[in-house]
Each structure stands twice: as C-alpha cells, then as structure tokens.
Image (spheres, coloured by chain):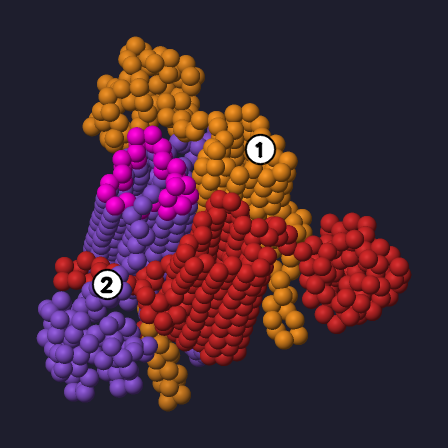
Chain colours: A orange, B red, C purple
Amino acid sequence: MNLGDVAKKINGKVEGDSSIDITGVSSIEIAKKGHITFAKGKKFLEKLKKSKASAVLVETKEEISMSQIISSNPELAFARLLDYFHPEPRPKPEIHSSVVLGLNVKLGNRVALSPFVSIGDNVRIGDDVVVYSGSVIGDNCELGKSTLIHANVTLYRNTIIGSSVTIHAGAVIGSDGFGYTADDKGRHIKINQIGNVVIEDNVEIGANSCVDRAATGTTLIKKGTKIDNLVQIAHNCTIGENCILVAQVGIAGSCNLGRHVVLAGQAGLSDHVTVGDNVTLAAKSAALRDIKDNSVYGGIPALPLNIWKRSVAVFAKLPDLSRKIRDLENRLNNIEKKNIDQ
Amino acid sequence: MNLGDVAKKINGKVEGDSSIDITGVSSIEIAKKGHITFAKGKKFLEKLKKSKASAVLVETKEEISMSQIISSNPELAFARLLDYFHPEPRPKPEIHSSVVLGLNVKLGNRVALSPFVSIGDNVRIGDDVVVYSGSVIGDNCELGKSTLIHANVTLYRNTIIGSSVTIHAGAVIGSDGFGYTADDKGRHIKINQIGNVVIEDNVEIGANSCVDRAATGTTLIKKGTKIDNLVQIAHNCTIGENCILVAQVGIAGSCNLGRHVVLAGQAGLSDHVTVGDNVTLAAKSAALRDIKDNSVYGGIPALPLNIWKRSVAVFAKLPDLSRKIRDLENRLNNIEKKNIDQ
Amino acid sequence: MNLGDVAKKINGKVEGDSSIDITGVSSIEIAKKGHITFAKGKKFLEKLKKSKASAVLVETKEEISMSQIISSNPELAFARLLDYFHPEPRPKPEIHSSVVLGLNVKLGNRVALSPFVSIGDNVRIGDDVVVYSGSVIGDNCELGKSTLIHANVTLYRNTIIGSSVTIHAGAVIGSDGFGYTADDKGRHIKINQIGNVVIEDNVEIGANSCVDRAATGTTLIKKGTKIDNLVQIAHNCTIGENCILVAQVGIAGSCNLGRHVVLAGQAGLSDHVTVGDNVTLAAKSAALRDIKDNSVYGGIPALPLNIWKRSVAVFAKLPDLSRKIRDLENRLNNIEKKNIDQ
C-alpha cells in the first residue's frame, strides 16, 4: 500500500512522496525501511533524524526530509494503522476435537475453540468468538460476538460477557465474593455468593486479574473499561464506562466508580467507596472515603494530590523540622529565663 | 417451605404469618416475593419498607408489617438459609474420560473429576471431592473429604489438604519458596525447596493466590482460615486458625500468625514477623516487626492504629506546620535581636 | 555417601569422623540422623546442640562435638548438597498422548510434555525441556535446553526463553502490554502490541506472575534474574542480570533496571524509571524517579533509605510536634505582648 492510500485510511494528508510503499508500522527506534512511525514533541522529532522509517505521522507539518502524514490525532491514526498492518492473529474458526461441550450449548458462526477448552451447560457463544487452550467456561455463561478469551482463563457459572471483550490468560471471572459471618465460636461461616458478573462490550481484562461475583445481584464492569494484569475487583462493585485500572489495583466490595476513572498501579479502594467521574487516583494510593467528580487524589489515605505532594515534600525534612523545634524551645527557654531574671 | 419451617431450621421465632411460602433468600434491595431477607440497623430497616421480600430475619422484634423471624444471630441465620436454598452446585460424581490418573491413586466415593484434570502418582482423594477442569494435582498430594478444587488450580507435589477446603480458580499451592544464596560471582544459586504445604480443614483460598512450600518442613494454613484473591504466602509461614487475609496481602517467609488475625487488603509482612492472636492490620500497612496479641496496627511501617491516625491527620497539615516554624523563627530572631540591642 | 565424600563434592574439609554416612540435607530444626545441616551465627550454633543432624557445614571450626565440614561459603555448599541429595524431580521424558502439537514444531531430545499441553505452530523446544500439565505455548515460541515450565503456564506467541529457565505455575508471559490511546469521544482505543518477551538463561519466574510483551521491540529479562510470585512487569521493560524481584512487585512500562537490583515485596516503579546497578528498594516503596547505582531507597515516593527512616521516626511523633508548635506560639505571644506592654 502506498503512502497516499495509507493517508486515506486515516483521513490524513500527505506531505512528501505519496507513492512510497508502506509495509508496516513501528516505533521510531526500531522502525525499518517501509515502516511508518509516529512522532509527538521535540524529543521524538530529534529521534526521527536517526530513524530508518520511511514516513511519519505528525500533527502539524514538520521541517524534516521524511515523508509525513498530517493527522489531527496522530496517535490514534498510529493505533489504527497498527491494527491494519499488524492485526491480532486469530486461530482458524474450528472446534478442536478435544473440546468438551456441555448440554444445550449454542455456538455462533466461525467460533474457534482451542484444545482442552471446557464449556459448561447452557452456554451461549456468539459469532467469531475465540477461546484459547485450557480455558474453562462455566454453566450458563454468555460470550458476545467477537470476544476473545485467552488461554487458561476461568469463567465461573452465570458470567455474562458482551461483545468485543478481551480476557487475558489466567484471569478468573466470577469467583466467590469474600463474604463470611461468624458463629458463636468465632468461626467464619461462608455466605454463599449467589450473584454473578456482567462485563459489557469492549472491556479488556488483564492476565491473572480477578473479578468476584456478587453476593446477590451483579458485579458490573461497564463498556470500554480497560483493566491491567493482577487487578482485584471484589463482589458487588460497579466499574463505570471507559475506566483505566492499572496493574495490581485492588477494589474492595461494593465500590462504585464513575466514568473515566483512572486508578494508577497498586492503588486500592476500601469497601463501599464511591468515586465520581473523571477521578484519577495516584499509584499506590488508598481511597478510604468517597471522592468527588473531576478530582485527583494520592497518598495513604488519599488526599487531594497537590496537598499530598506538598506534605510529602515536608515529610523528607521532618528530622530537620524536629531539630528546629527543639532549637526554638531552647531559645524560648533562655528568653523566658532572662525575662524572669530581670 | 413455609416460614414456620424456616424458623425451625435456624432455631428462630416467627412474628407474623408462619404459613407464608419461602422460596429463596436475598438481599433487601433485590429480594422478590417469596424471599426472606436480613436487616440489621436503622438504615436497613428503612430499606425494608421498599423491599419486596416476604419475610425478614431480625435480632429483635421490629414494628413493621412484614413477617419476621427473630434470631439471636440473624446474619448467621441468613448464611445458613442461603446455603439451604442456594447451595453451591456440584458436578455429577463422575470421572471424565479425559482425566489422567497417575499410578497408585486412591479415589474416595462420589468423587467428581472434570475434563482435563491431571492427577499425579500416589495421590489420595477423599469422598465427595470435586476437582474442576484443568486443575493439576501433583504427586503424593492428599485431598480430604468434601474438598472443592476449582478450575485451573495447580497443586505442586506433596501438598496435603484437609476436608471441606475450597481452593479457587488459578490458585497455586506448593510452588517453590523464593530461596537463593550467592556464589562468588554474585550469581543467585537456588536453594532447593524440599518442604511442603499443609492446609487444614475448612480453609478457603481465593483465586490466583499463591502459597509456597517450605524450604524444609511445612508451610501451614490452620483450620478455618479464609484467604482472598491474589494473596501471596511465602515459604515456611504458619497462619493460625480462623484468620482473614484480604485480597493482595503479601506475607514474606517464615512469618507466624496467631488465631483470628485480620490482614486487610494489600497489607504486607516482612519475613520472620510474629503476629499475635486477634491482631488486625489495616489495609496497605506493612508490619516490619512483631505485633502483640489483641492489637490494631496500621501504616508503613505499622504503628498502633490510633497513633497512625493522629499522625496521618497532622501529615496533611505539614506545609502549614513548616510555615509556622519559619514564622516562629523569625519572631524569635526579632526578640533576640531586640534583647541584644537593649 | 560418607562425610569425606560429601566434603570432596564441595571442596570442604572434614573436622571429625569422615566415615559417617550422610543420607540427606536439612535445616537444623528438623534434621534427622544421617542429615547434614548448615549453621551460621551464634543463634544457630546454639540450636545445633538440640539438632539430630549427624554433621554440619560451618565457615570456621566450631567447638562442638558434631562432625563438621569447613567451607568458605557454607550456605552455597548447603545449596549444592541439597541439589545433590534432593534434586528437583523431573517427569519421564515422554510426550503424553493428549498433547497437541502445532505445525512445524521442533522437539529436542528427552523432552517431557505432560497431559493437556498445547504447543502452537513453529515452536522450538530444546533438549531436556519439561512442560507440565495444562501449559499453553503460543506460536513461534522458543524454549532453551533444560528449561522447566510448570503447570497451567501461558506463553503468548513469539516468546523466546533461554536455557535452564524455570517458569512457575500460572505465570503468563507475553500478554498484551497495556497500551491505549483515546478517540475524540474519550473511548480507549487499543494500540496493538506487536513486540515480544525475551527471557535469558537461568531466570526463574514465580507463580502467577505476568510479563507483558513490548508494544514494539522486546520486554527483556536478563540472565540470572529471579522473580517471585504475583509480580507484574509491564511492556518494554528491561530487567538487568541477577536482579531479585520479590513477590507482588509491580514495574510499569519502559523501566530499565541495572544488574543486581533488589526490589523488595510489593515495591513499585513508575513508567520510564531507570534504576542503576546494585540498587535496593525497600518493601512497599514506590520509585517515581530514576535511582543511581549503589543506593538504597525506601518510602512513597522513594527517598534514600536513611532519610526515610529518620522521617518515619518523626512521623510517629507528629501529634507531639504539632502540640509543641502550638505551645511555642503561645509562649511567643506572651513574650511579644509583654515586650509591647513594657
């Protein structure tokens, strides 16, 4: 495909030679001849000079010799071209002979079930679904069309998954919520968890992440939300649309997240915390209370991020402050003593 | 079953119509006609007014129109009724044709082994055990009666599991402890881990949690302890009876926990830490030293929780304190200068 | 094997009876007759008196009745003897009949593939490799000789693993890096991750840990590095030689670690952080900025450890400091008032 055709695919405008052949997409550092890359900011424009790429996506025309495509959102254009030139490979749409299907399973068209996949009773699988090796789909689960389940995933019974969802290897969806009560001897008695998990369209869930099913009702992940690896979502949470939960985040039971919430790596939420829309929680923070829309928090417990940053700056000087206070005390003692002596 | 019969099952007392038909158990919010629910505290009594439930478990008689069962421990009664009306479903007691059994395996009565389960040599499996698809039971393991192993679990060799234990999907029990020494070139040389893991009766272990086997000897989880998802327990730890380890807790090697210890989410323990009975460690805390019986700690490093809370309250005002100290210094300078001038 | 022969294996020197029979290796506490153990420091020498071991590895001759082997590095000698007397058991070198092999798979000599292993197309497996039950090896992967893949591991396509590597159960290598961009409606659009993961020789990766493949290029774990359970390594990271990453560590994208870096349990790194050689980061710390060679850091955000320790000591006294400042203010007010009154 030549550069002109590439530009058309993403509604961009060529500056330079439209006829050059584009064969792939890559980052600046490792791009080869025939690749188109993407640059934003002076640092990357500097790197472009050494790049072997044949063309570059930019926001505004740059004074460089390399052919350019001007795009109003070059990073998005880059993502779209990556998907065009290097799409996620999919296995052939066939059911491997080793697959075990339960009773009353409904399979859509072009479904691919890899070796050693186990499908429970009453499962419904949409068109173009892929389930990789070793994954286990419990009774009464539903997988919407074009959903991709990687290897060794476990879906407990009654899990409902929308379309174009990706679940990465080792993830566990629908495991028992962590709910107990105590008997008169202080022993923990299990509260059976009879709810389920619902995952809406276009959600992605990372490797070895866990989403527990609700005690009663539903643990809900709304559409477009992206969840990284090793994340824990406890029972009865609702995660809003288009959230980003970075690796090793932990969300305790019955939390409620708005839209476009970003929880950075290893952040945590106490149970029953409500987080508004467009909230960002810094890495390693702990939100113990509700957080309002459009705010940025950090720290343990979480504070507005600017307050946290200022306090943290003083924290490193605490020994110095402590010394100053002792010094002030001594000087005051002297003055008071002198005043009395006078 | 009518309400009178339900009351008998849990040694409760009906206030209202004993003859109404009870068909299920649910939370207040989503209960339907025929359901019995559970209420504790004014907030829930308020919610009851809007609930469609037919009856409610309460501790003392309430002035409401709904039929009630009075129970000394209504939450426990609720758990017992949930288990009666909505028991954990179990697969048929059969060995799927795909299951691979090692040499000298002893199977109890009514064992269910799902597709693609792999059982090593010399494994002993008790009556009524269930092992779901894709789980791998290493050589010389033992599973006590009524134990439930969910899908894609891995038990390394020599793991001993008691009765009525539940291990959730993806959990790994008995993996190598993280033990190395260094050679003269600073390379890490593995110390083979030749111990094992023992899990006593009525323990529950969450999805994708890991328990390493001992270097020599045994990593031990005592009876009644409940462990949430993504928890790490390192080699040679002993976890006492009836502990609660919430999601993403990490316990380093050779720690020793007493009974009824609660480690809240994402808390961590340094190696060789001993924690007494009835200790609670707050979420995200780090216990670097031993903690005595009956105490509540929090923070990094962990402090008695009341101290931590007070310090944290001041932390948010550190910039202010810093300013005050500068102000005090200036004022003292002025006074001292004046005193000298006099 | 007698004690004299044992000493020869590790270039040690016997003090005592060379003829006694050694049948195993164990820790002091649980050693039995016939075992050799290892002692370092007074505490362990004290424990030796009660040990049933027949011999002990020590650094210098001790005044004890037990037979000794003097070794310049007794812990290393202990590790080598453990490996000799209690080697990691390996399954028979055979391909189980249930194993599914893709097209164009190259298998070395003496390879063991356990039940329900799935191997993709174009995979190359070296001599003496073991893959345990339920593991899934994606297309185009390579496993170097003597590498050991435990049960239920998933390797995504194109993962390259060196020789003598151990990957523990449930680990996921090569999953999609967590990379998105936004469209004009604020929806997250996936940036396809077209790189891979390379793991060099003698690396060990713990149970349920995750290593994401690079966006473009390679996520690289260099030789001799040891990674514990539930660790997250994001896309495009480079982890240097002989590092130690303890359980639940999280490393964000594009980080660069030098050699001999130690990240203690639950520590985290922000994206694009460069950490020099011989750096240690304390448990639960968060490095948000680059760290130079040969330094020890701790805290959130990470400070030089001695500064962090001193600040933490003051932190516990913050309420006291706050009170002292109020007191100083009052006293100064009094003095200033008096000065004005005069």
Above/below status of C189 relative to B158: above
Q: Nearer the viewer, mark 1 or mark 2?
A: 2
The answer to whether marks 1 and 2 sit on the same chain is no
Q: Chain of mark 2?
A: C
Provide the residue designation for mark 1: A125
Q: Is residue C54 magenta?
A: no
Q: Is residue C100 magenta?
A: yes
Above/below status of A26 relative to B322: above
Seen from the viewer's position, the closer of residues A158 and C22 is: C22
The kind of residue tagged 1 is: Ile
Residue B6 percent location from the top left of the image: 80, 62
* Residue range highlighted in magenta: C96-125
* Main secondary-structure element of the magenta-colored stretch: loop
Q: Residue farthest to the top? A: A19
Residue A138 in view here: yes
Query: Regarding mark 1 in the picture, which secondary structure is present there?
Result: strand
Provide the residue designation for mark 2: C83
Left or right: where B5 falls relative to A225: right
